[in-house]
Amino acid sequence: MKMKVLTMGVLAGVLVMTGCSPPKEETRTHATPRTVKTMVVARRDLPVVVSSVGRLFPNREVVLSSEVSGIVETYSADTGDAAAAGTTLVALDPTDYRLALNESRANLAAARARYTAAKNSHFRAGQLLPEKVITQEYFDKIEADYKAAQAAVSQAEAVVDINQRRLAKTEINAPFDSLVARRLVEAGQHINIGDPVMAIADMMSMRVKLHVNEQDYVHLDHDDIVSVLIEAFPDRTFPGQVDRIGVKADSQTNTFEVEILVANPDLLLKAGLTATVKITVDRIRDAILIPQGCVLFRENRKEVFVVTDAGQAAVREVKLGRVDGSSVMILAGITEGDRLVTTGGQYLKEGDPVVVADSL
């Protein structure tokens, strides 16, 4: 019995001591602020640029052919040579054509002499007919001879003109300032009418042929700003001009052909080089652009983090627009003046305290 009372007394003492001891302080944990880099969201104009890749072509390229037959006597230019407009590139032996011209000129002189005699006879007969010195039948014969002589002169003049043109065609000239792309004949070679002799190209201006989709095509205009980048000259940009805009889409690709003209006064550009063409077709005023790396893709949402005035991270769902290089246009979700987290956002969650390392 005494042992039972003693045990109960000890328990009671322990309870009293426990109830009188001071309470322990509640342990509180504070989140460690994360260091981020930020930028202040601002507005700027966004150029709408159509970009496409093509190859350079000469502005004009033709194959010169002979319009008369003959033996190639000389050629004055070879592959790669410059040829000014009017320069004789290939000359045929003109001997036969010169002889034919001389013959036709002699025939013309004889025809003109016969015409003069017939004209004088017709004049005298016209004076004698009213006086009944000659008959009407004789006058008609004189008049017919006169008209025939007149026609013979016209015919002889035409033959002279034809032979002059044939003689002139023994010299094949450059129709415009150009470079010789290929020489296709040799001296001493016999050529026929229509045989090619030289391929020439106008390379003072170069052409780039592009194929543009219908979404970009509808914005194109001849006065759009064009810049051309050539892979062979990575440190230079060449200005261009929209020269031709196709009016019918290709049935297979559903794209429209567009031709860009690029000035080439120093003949630096050559046919076949690869060209990247950028055409500024429009300009979006006061657009909000942010670095693409700021955007977080989470489930079906596109999010960014901003820093509030209280120094906390706040998530914003955004709607994306056009891409401009490493930047992307924001259509909704943030506004001008927001402090956007540019580095460290992937480690944040809503309400986290942050420390801004620097700002832009």
Image (cartoon, rainbow, N blue to C red):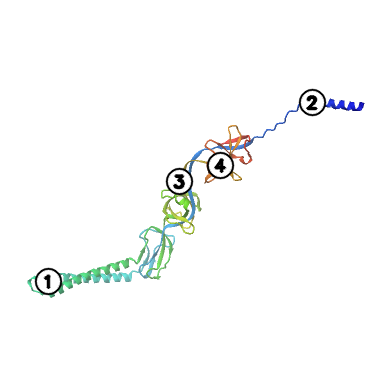
Residue 346 point in image, percent of width and height: 62, 41
Residue closest to the eye, 230 or 24: 24
The residue indicated by pointer 4 is: 318
- Residue density around tag 2, few if under 14, some if 14–19, many if 20 or more, within 10 Å: few
What amino acid type is highlighted by mark number 1? Answer: Ala
The residue indicated by pointer 1 is: 125
Q: Where, by quadrant of the figure, is residue 34 drawn?
A: top right
The residue indicated by pointer 2 is: 19
- Residue 96 relative to residue 109: left or right: right
Instruction: State the separation of the CA atoms marked 1 and 3.
Output: 84 Å
Q: Nearer the viewer, mark 2 or mark 4?
A: 2
Q: Can residue 216 be spotted in the picture? A: yes
Instruction: State the separation of the CA atoms marked 3 and 4.
Output: 24 Å
The residue indicated by pointer 3 is: 282
Instruction: State the separation of the CA atoms marked 2 and 4.
Output: 57 Å
Label 1 vs 3, first from the N-terminus = 1
Q: Nearer the viewer, mark 3 or mark 4?
A: 4
Label 2 vs 4, first from the N-terminus = 2
- Residue 227 relative to residue 175: left or right: right
Residue 18 point in image, percent of width and height: 80, 26
Instruction: State the separation of the CA atoms marked 3 and 2.
Output: 80 Å
Q: Nearer the viewer, mark 4 or mark 1?
A: 4
Marks 4,1: beta carbons within 8 A: no
Q: Can residue 113 be spotted in the picture? A: no
